[in-house]
Amino acid sequence: MKFNPATLPENEINSGKIWTLLRYNKQFDGDLNWFSAKYKKTKSKRVKQENRETALTDCRQKYEEINKINPFAGIALQWMFPMPIIIEEDGQGGIEHPCSWGPVIMLAKGDKVDDLAELKECEASKNWLTLKTDWRSANKGFKRNFMFQYRQLDSRPVNPITKNRSDSPLPHETAFFDDLDLATLINQGPNLTEEGLEKVIHANDLRQNYRTFVVPRHLHTKKAVDEAFKTLIKGVKDSLPTKASERFGTDAEWKDFMQVKKIQAESKCSKKDAIVSMTKLRSSVYLAAESRRTYETGIKKNINAIEDKIFRCYPNFHF
């Protein structure tokens, strides 16, 4: 059986599923082939310097296009075709090249993770990411970056190092409106003060990473708090599934999909023939034609569900 991301621990399961969906997306594969050809030019000493620079600029532009609409794919590009960005301990940047796109390497002393040592280990072993790399086999830096990106979309996972969500959106009471003078901010126009710029950045963070609700400011008892939040909680919960992990495929869907992929890889057969083979493998007794067709229909439905998610995961992340 090929590695099944549905078997991952809760803190990693959806990150692993998203990466697996990307691995099977044909359009992503095509863009990687383009990127790979350009990237090889940037590294080849046989290519003229001016042509290497042109290829590097092309790569950077392509990376920005992809990362803008799909940060998960952007992270994958960083660990497939690395052009590291080095951040010194004082926060000042020293980058390998003006067109570098990542991964970002922090040189802070005392950190629990030595980003630079991990990068050098990858360089020495040539253990860079490819579409053949399943989640379990991926390097730590890629998984850490990928899981960080997923935490921006899900309020449950925690940072595996700090064991909290200090680097991700978390429930809190915002102070954004406490000193907001909207008229003054508008009148500043393009000449924003430092305080005005902070407000704009804070507003963008709230818009992108949070849902905004309002409750009366003056709640004087615990019962009043319960009553104020009761309607909000019900409204938010009504539209959500019981298990968020099902958003990227159920256990049964992934089990069927990965087993069919395994049979196809081993037998070089079509998806249809693989489903027939899988039905025979799983059945300990002879199935009548009607029962077999019903069973195969269930398998097809599960596979189609994953294939639909593969289609929706790139170029835009439609979840």
Image (cartoon, rainbow, N blue to C red):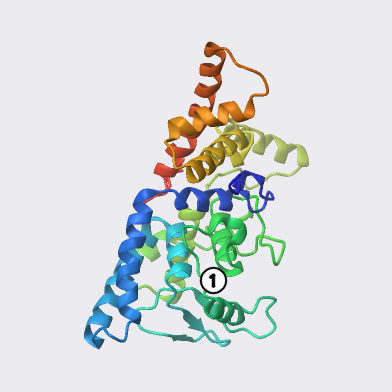
Most foreground residue, 262 or 121: 262
Most foreground residue, 109 or 233: 109
Residue 57 placed where, x, y %?
28, 76
Most foreground residue, 7 or 164: 7
* Residue 123 vertical position relative to residue 218 in the rendered view, above or below: below
Q: Is residue 144 left or right of residue 47?
A: right
* Residue 234 vertical position relative to residue 69 in the rendered view, above or below: above
- Residue shown at the point (32%, 79%) measured from the top left: 42
* Residue 128 vertical position relative to residue 148 in the rendered view, above or below: below
Residue 185 placed where, x, y %?
39, 65
In the rendered picture of this protein, how many numbered marks are placed on residues? 1
Helix, strand or loop at label 1? It is loop
Residue 128 visible, this orientation: yes
Q: Is residue 65 left or right of residue 193?
A: left
Residue bearing mark 1: 127
* Residue 302 vertical position relative to residue 124 in the rendered view, above or below: above
Q: Amino acid at mark 1?
A: Asn
- Residue shown at the point (44%, 48%) measured from the top left: 24
- Residue shown at the point (27%, 81%) measured from the top left: 52
**Dot 1, how many residues are within 10 Å of its Cα: few (below 14), some (14-19), or many (20+)?**
some
- Residue shown at the point (61%, 50%) measured from the top left: 155
Q: Is residue 243 left or right of residue 270?
A: right
Most foreground residue, 104 or 51: 51
Residue 307 placed where, x, y %?
44, 38
Residue 190 visible, this orientation: no
| Quadrant of the rendering where the N terminus is positioned | top right
Residue 166 placed where, x, y %?
65, 64
